[in-house]
Amino acid sequence: FYVGGREYFAALAAAFAEAKTSIYVAGWRVRPGVLLRRPPDVENAESLADALGAAARRGIEVRVLLYREVSESLQAKHRSAEHARALEALGVRVLRHPKHLSTGQLFWSHHEKVCVVDSKVAFLGGMDLCE
């Protein structure tokens, strides 16, 4: 049970580092550059991209389900296409929802915040992996 981001992000980074087979992430907002660990807790900062990229290089199956916003012009900070490309460049498989108009449903969203490691450890709750 985590109350603050500092403890939650550190536990998430530790679980990612210990993953043996898989890491699955579903998020409404996921920003690769968000810091999971930072000084003074550790000597060198570690971002989400660092953690997931390291897992992918170890041969861990890393998958991210990322919400596709209606328009990046509504909230430029989302930039999910850019974030998806950055994660894919690290060996992470990214799935974004279909384009809203193609489904006939303009306004909808998944709002999950779920991380599952090795189908054994799950992090659920209200913190997005972003600023």
Image: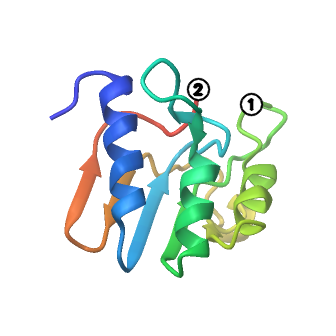
Q: Position of residue 12 (x, y in %)?
A: 36, 46
User: What residue occupies the far top of the structure in this picture?
Assistant: 40
- Disc 1 crowd rating (10 Å Cα; few below 14, some 14-19, many 20+) is few
Q: Nearer the viewer, residue 33 or 42?
A: 42
Q: Amino acid at mark 2?
A: Glu
Identified at 45% across, 60% down, the residue is: 25
Q: Position of residue 89 (x, y in %)?
A: 78, 67
Q: Which residue is mark 1?
A: 77
Identified at 72% across, 47% down, the residue is: 70
The answer to whether residue 63 is above or below residue 77 is: below
Left or right of residue 86: residue 21: left
The answer to whether residue 78 is above or below residue 80 is: above
Identified at 30% across, 73% down, the residue is: 118
Q: How many dots with numbers?
A: 2
Asked if the residue at tag 1 contacts the one at tag 2, i.e. Cβ–Cβ closer than 8 Å, the answer is yes
Give the position of the N terminus as an image quadrant.
top left
Left or right of residue 49: residue 60: left
Quadrant assignment, res 76: top right
Identified at 78% across, 55% down, the residue is: 81
Q: CA distance from mark 2 to mark 1?
A: 10 Å
